[in-house]
Image (cartoon, rainbow, N blue to C red):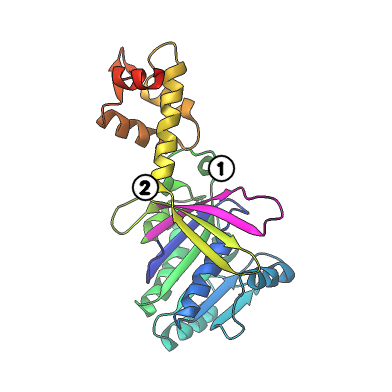
Amino acid sequence: MVPDSGNLLIVAAPGAGKTFLALVIAKTAAAAGRPSLLVLEEGRPRSMFDRFTALAFPPDAPVLIAHRKGVRLDDEAIRAKMAEFLRAHDAPVVVFDPFSSLFLGNENDTEAVNQAKEHVQRLATVNPRALVVLLHHTSKAGERGEGPPIYAARGSTVLPGWADMQVNLSREDTPRNSGLVAFVAQVAKGRDGETAQRFRFTLSLGKGTVMVEDVSAAVAQDKAQQVREVLASATAPLNKSRLAESVGGRKQDALRAIDAMEARGELKREGGGYILAPDTAKERES
C-alpha cells in the first residue's frame, strides 16, 4: 500500500492512527536499511517515547527525530539541513507530522498552501528515491463521510494534488485492555488509479508486531448488504442520493456499492428510484 518512493499524504482525524502509521513506515524502512527523518510537532515527549517503545523500535534503528523543535517549512535554513539528509542517503524517508504545525498560514488559502507545498516538493526532488510522508487532518465534512475521499483533507485541495498516493485512516475498535490498536486505511488516490482498496492495520503494542489485512472485499460486501436492507424495508423506490444517505457512512462508498449492484443486476430502476430486483428479493425471502 505504501510506495517505495514519491509523495504520500496520510489524512485522518485526531487519534485515528496517523502517527502510528508513520512510525510503522519508519520501522519498516529501518529494517530494510533505509534511514528516516521524523519531524514530529505534536505530542508530549513521554507519549512519543511510549509509542516508540510500544512498536518495539530497535535501539540501533537509523531514525533521526526532531520532536517539537518548531520546524517551519518556510525556514530556508531548516530546509537546507533536510536537503543535506536527503542527499546523504540512498533512499531515505522523511515524515512531516502534522502539516498544520509546520505551516502557520491559512489552510484554506490556496496560494499560501501552494507555497508550502512547493517547499516540500523541492525537498522531494533532491532525492527521487526518497519517500516523503505528509500527515494532515481530516476536514469536518471528511469526518462525516461527505464528498469524494480524495478531498477528505482539511483546507485547500493543493495537497491531494501534490500526493502520488493519498491514504485516509479511520480508527477501529479493539477489545479493552487488549494491547491492540487498529485502523483501516483507504487508498483515496493511487498511482494506478485504484481507490477502492482498504487495509486493516492491527498493531500489537509492546510486541511491536503489525498485521495487515486486505478488507476491500469485506467492506464492499457489507455496504451492499446495507443497501439490500434499506431497500427491503422501504415502502417506495428510493432515488440514488436518498438511498446512499439512508445507507449511512461515507456517501461515495454507498454510491459505489449501488452502481456495482445495478451492474450485477441486483437492483432495478422503478419510478425514478431503485428497488431490489425480483430474484434478489426472492432470495432474501427464502
* Residue 107 location (% of width, % of height): 53, 54
Q: Where is residue 33 in the image (x, y as percent from the top left)?
A: 45, 83
Position of the C terminus, as image quadrant, is top left
**Residue 184 colored in magenta in the image:** yes
Label 1: few (<14), some or many (≥20) within 10 Å?
few
Measured as percent of width and height from the top left, residue 91 is found at 40, 80
Q: Please state the total of marks drawn on the protein image.
A: 2
Vertical placement of 124 versus 15: above or below?
A: below
Q: Residue at x 48, y 25 (%)?
A: 246
The stretch drawn in magenta includes residue 110 = no
Identified by mark 2, the residue type is Ala
* Residue at which label 1 appears: 140
- For label 2, the crowd category at 10 Å Cα-Cα, with few meaning under 14, some 14 to 19 and many 20 or more, is some
**Distance between mark 1 and mark 2 Cα atoms:** 22 Å
Question: Does residue 244 appear in this view?
Answer: no
Query: What's the magenta region?
Result: 165-187
Nearer-N-terminus badge (1/2)? 1
* Image quadrant where one finds the N terminus: bottom left
In depth, the one of 80 and 27 nearer the eye is 27
Looking at the rendered structure, the secondary structure element under dot 1 is: helix
Left or right placement of residue 271 versus residue 54 in this view? left
Residue occupying image coordinates x 63% and y 54%: 15
- Image quarter for residue 158? bottom left
Q: Which residue is at 58% across, 61% downward? A: 203
Kind of residue indicated by mark 1: Lys
Q: Do the residues labelled 1 and 2 touch (CB within 8 Å)?
A: no
Disc number for residue 196? 2
User: 100 or 185: nearer the eye?
Assistant: 185
